[in-house]
Structure formats: C-alpha cells, structure tokens
Amino acid sequence: MSMQPLRDYDVSVLEEKQVVIPGPEPKINHEAEMVIQVCTPDLGEKETEYVTDAIKSGWISSRGEYLNRFEEEFAKKVGAKYAVAVNSGTSALHLALATLGVGEGDEVIVPSATMVSTAFAVSYLGATPVFVDCDKYYQIDVEGIKRAITPNTKAIIPVHIYGHPVDCDAIEALGYPVIYDAAEAHGALYKGEPLGGRGLASCYSFYGNKIITTGEGGMITTNNEEIAKVARNLKDVAFSTVRHFWHTRLGYNFRMTNLQAAVGLAQTERYDELVQKHIDHANYYLEGLKDLPLRFPLNAPYAKNSYWMFGFEVLPGYGLNRDGLREALANRGIETRTFFVPMHLQPYYYDYKPHHFPNAERLSALGMYIPSSSKLTQEDQDYVIKAIKDVL
C-alpha cells in the first residue's frame, strides 16, 4: 500500500494578511545587561525531593503513588471530582473528545484566537474544527458560537485564553457538550469558583511555561464519573479489566509517568503561591506601564484572571510597531512572544473561504506578552518596564 503524500498548501493566498502575521523571532542579545526569558519554571526543593523518592522507589513509569496523589490534589484545587493525568494538554483534549465519540463528519467549534493544539485535537479524530472570533476579553465570542452551529456540531471547545475564563454559563446554556481548554487557566475563577468541574470536562497543560508544570504533561478534570472512567482506560492503550493484552476499544498511549507526577504534586502543593505570584506580577506591570500607548486586556465582571502570561497590544502611538518593540527588547536581553496567529490564517487550516475575524486578527497584529514567570524578581520587572519606556 502506497503512502498518501502530505497535503501541500498555497500560502501565497495569505499575502493580503501578512500585516497580521508576525515577523521572524528576534534574536536575543545574550551580552545585554540582563537576560530575561519569557518564562522559566519555578521549581524548588520539594520537587527534587519527590522526584528523588520516586526514583528510589523504582516506580518511574506510568504507575506509582505520585500519580494518584497528583490527580487527587489537582482535582481538589480546580474544583473537580475526578482527574486523569496524561502526557500533554493536547492529549487531554484529544482524549476528552474521544470519550465523546467525536469522529469524521462531526464539527467542533473552537476559537480562532488560540494555540493550534486546540484545533489539532479535533483534526486528530477526523472531525472539522469550526473557527469563531473572540470578544473584547480575548475569549471566544458567544454570539459567534451561535452563528457557527450546524446540524453537524458535536461539541464546543472554549479556551480560557491567557488565564482569563470564558463566559461558562452563556456557553453551556447553548445545550451542546462543552470541553474546556484550560491549558492556561490554573488558578482562574469564574464567578468566584474554580473551573475544573465545568462542562463535560476541562483539559489542563503542564508544559514548562505553565503556572503548574511537570515539564510535559496534562490533566483531564471532570465531575462525570463515566467520562473519567473511559478516559482512564483509553489513555492506557485501552487495556481490558477482564484480561491483560485484551482490547475492545481503540486506545492511546497518553500516560504520564510517576516522575512527572512527583513534580506535579510538589507544584500543586504550591498552587496558591504560584498563582498569586502571577497575579502580583501582572499588577506590578500594570502600574509600571500605565499611561503608555499600550492596550491592556480587559477583565470581565465574572472573571478572576490568573495572568498565565502578561501581555498587551502595541498601539500606533507608541512609535514602534509590535515587531519593532520586540526587536528592541530582544536587543536588551528580554525575550517576548506574540499573541497567537489565528487558526483561520494558519496554512494548514486556510480553506480559501472569506473568513474575517477582526478581533483575532487585531490581536495577532498588535499583541505580545513579556516575561511572566512566577520566578521574576522586582529587579527583573523593573528592567523590563524601563526597557519598554526607554524604547518609546
């Protein structure tokens, strides 16, 4: 059987959108007075202690006490009854969709302003991601969701972008299964309550730049016992409970290791501290950068933003455009990132339809975020703030 060639994409059709698409990554000047990464993991003695203990126990693969403890503690922190640890946030989304039976012919509504993993998880199962613009809070637009619904709509994946929750009540009221992408939302609150028990499931990431990290890793949280049971089976290559090496479902090897869980448990025991550091750093930036020609994210009345990353839009009055500011900061040793390039403009997903999502495109053209690690010192932040003012 011959292999099918990879699909080729004519990116020339995107030329008219080049103003929206960021330029190349600026090169960091490592000879600058200070070098500050956009995010570094905040790991301490407890993480080392737990990993060492896991190694000494011999339980280094996908079984061990740290996996159970991590799942239990993380579920409590995010307000869910059940948690299933997996090897990435992308796998968590993939697995949650699989428990719902999403497949070919189905459509899943996702925001255009998101990380590509949200859309990829839909595509992995042969379904079609349907993109929707964002609102003034950078979150998926509820009215846009309503317009995107078709007879083929199987589910909705709202994304709590940059640590700000979506309007959960309004989305759940539409009556479709909701799987939340909570990769960036550790510690965020909706109407004063944690997010992990909302909808069918919530999917978290523990990538190295997340508030809670295991290096690589993810978690599905849910209040639905059956979803948790099926997800736990599917992530473990669908081993039968009747006999070993017996499979009645298509399973996946999405397992987290006990070593990763040891780090995750230590991080979760510091959950409130790590979240509060991100909030405090955001407030310090907001005070230090006020009155500059920058547009900062708005917070909805229902939301407590955990500020996974602190970002803003660079307005025309600044003097440099967004990419120019990034270059200037890189020359001073400061690493930054742009906001997400919209999904409807990605070469893989561009389908020649006349999509125009003005909010997502504006954020892609103007938005960036600056160093946001919980490890930042006041000296670090003062250096970043001064650099932004100096290049103005």
Image (tube, grey):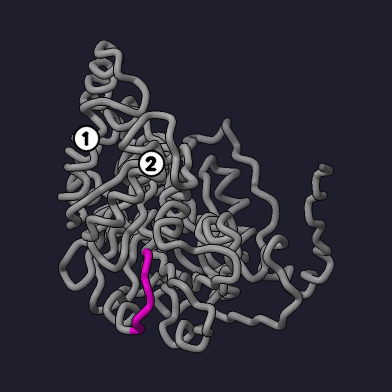
Do tag 2 and tag 1 residues touch (Cβ < 8 Å)? no
Task: Give the image quarter of residue 257.
Answer: top left
> What secondary structure prevails in the magenta region?
loop
Question: Mark 2, residues whose alpha carbon is within 10 Å: few (<14), some, or many (≥20)?
Answer: many
Q: Position of residue 138 (x, y in %)?
A: 44, 72
Residue, far front:
242
The crowd level at tag 1 (other Cα within 10 Å; few <14, some 14-19, many 20+) is: some
Q: Amino acid at mark 2?
A: Val
Residue 221 vs 303, above or below: the answer is above
Quarter that holds the N terminus:
top right
Q: Secondary structure at mark 2?
A: strand
* Residue 10 at x, y percent in the picture: 83, 64
* Depicted 386 relative to depicted 255: above or below: below
Q: Which residue is mark 2?
A: 86
Q: Residue at x 57, y 69 (%)?
A: 129
For the point 47% across and 73% down, the residue is 154
Give the distance between the C-alpha atoms of the residues marked 2 and 1, in whole angstroms: 12 Å
Q: Nearer the viewer, residue 309 or 61?
A: 61
Residue bearing the label numbered 1: 68
| In the rendered image, the vertical position of residue 330 relative to residue 195, given as above or below | above
Residue 255 percent across, percent down from the top left: 40, 36
Place residue 17 in its image quadrant. bottom right
Q: Is 189 in the magenta?
A: no
140 and 108: which is toward the camera? 108
Using the rendered image of the protein, determine whether residue 272 is visible from the camera's viewpoint: yes
Segment colored magenta: 174-179
Instruction: Please report the residue visible at 21 percent of the width from the left and 35 percent of the height from the top.
Output: 68
Give the x, y percent position of residue 156: 43, 72
Q: Horizontally, is 378 left or right of 336 in the view?
A: left
For the C terminus, the quadrant is bottom right
Say if 241 sits above or below 272 in the image: above
